[in-house]
Amino acid sequence: MTLQFLSREILLVASEDERSRLLVGQLEAIGFMVTMNSEPNTIKDLLEHKFFAVAVFELDTPAVDFALNMLDFIAKVSPQTHGFVLATRESFHAAVSSYRKGAKDVILYEMENFPYLVDCVVKSATRIAQDQDRDRLLNEMNTVHKQFFKMMLNMHIRLMETETHLRYKEGVGMQELPPLNILIVDSEPTLAAGIMDHLSGEEGWSFTHCTWGSEALDHVASANFQVALVGKHLPDLPGSMISSTIQSTSPSTTILMFDYRGAAEISLYECSTSQEIPLLGSEPAAVAEKLKDIRASIASKSQKEEHIKSFKAQNYDFLQKYSRLKNKYAKLMEKSADNEP
């Protein structure tokens, strides 16, 4: 006979006599591995360090009502173990106490009851394995459902982003994009003026030009800038210090540092990577084009929240059902944990 159990280990706490040897033989004949012991400390040590699917306790071995104490003990150290009590005397108090302490059954310790006892042990070991399989399956299904939900949401967002990128690629007027506030920190007015010539306020561009680093920090403390253009060399403070302060104050701000390499050449750097960004030209027009790319990128990112809202609106019924199932699963797992012996 092939048995599929979580564990084949059985603990039998009983005196060694003809009855116990017969019971051990019957359990081992169907594939269980039986450990028999009657020494209190050894029994506790076994239960603490080894998993037994079933523990069978003779009521008064090695002391009167010792089985009742062991039922309390397995409830603490091994709640998955099913406990059975073998009654060597008829005692209403002992029987009631055994059931209250979580015993699966109380059986008179007589040989004619062994077939019933063995059948109970088999059913308990099978039930433990089935419960484990059920819980494992429910957890796997819950994980897969979460992954599937995320895949659906991400697929929706990617689709919406692709449509947005196509619109931008085909040419979207700046006035259709969210406004952009830009801080320019430069002791020279030429670059700022040149950029403003190419990017008008009517199309949603807003500029604040500061010639001093300390002035720029005052503006950052009181206003929200999506982009900051910071010159490396300022009259009062290093540009790197201004950039670091802005980054710590407003982590979402895109910071670009720039330097002049000559009368007409500009070097632009991404502050987070310190890598030079190649420009197509040496005039402010090249910087303006870079700012347009940044504005389009920021607009695309800001659409993500709107994409999530549209996903919820389009899949309202599904999300309601999904939420109810999640709540049922959580309550089932909570109830299962509360009902463990």
Image: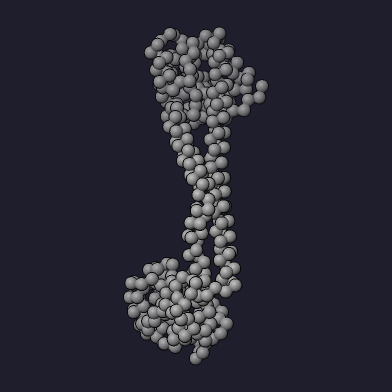
Picture coordinates of residue 222 (x, y %)? Answer: 33, 72
Q: Quadrant of the C terminus?
A: top left
Q: Quadrant of the N terminus?
A: top right
Who is closer to the viewer here, 241 or 306?
306
At x 45%, y 83%, the residue is 196
Q: Residue furthest right?
A: 1
Q: Does 155 appear above or below 231?
A: above
At x 52%, y 29%, the residue is 51
Picture coordinates of residue 55 (x, y %)? Answer: 50, 22
At x 44%, y 86%, the residue is 193
Q: Is residue 235 visible?
A: yes
Who is closer to the viewer here, 136 or 59?
136
Q: Is residue 230 visible?
A: no
The quadrant in which residue 67 appears is: top left
Q: Does 241 appear above or below 17?
A: below
Picture coordinates of residue 186 (x, y %)? Answer: 41, 83
In the drawing, does residue 28 fall left or right of residue 50? Answer: right
Picture coordinates of residue 250 (x, y %)? Answer: 40, 68
At x 48%, y 38%, the residue is 328
Q: Residue furthest bottom?
A: 263
User: How many numbered discs sit on the rendered protein?
Assistant: 0
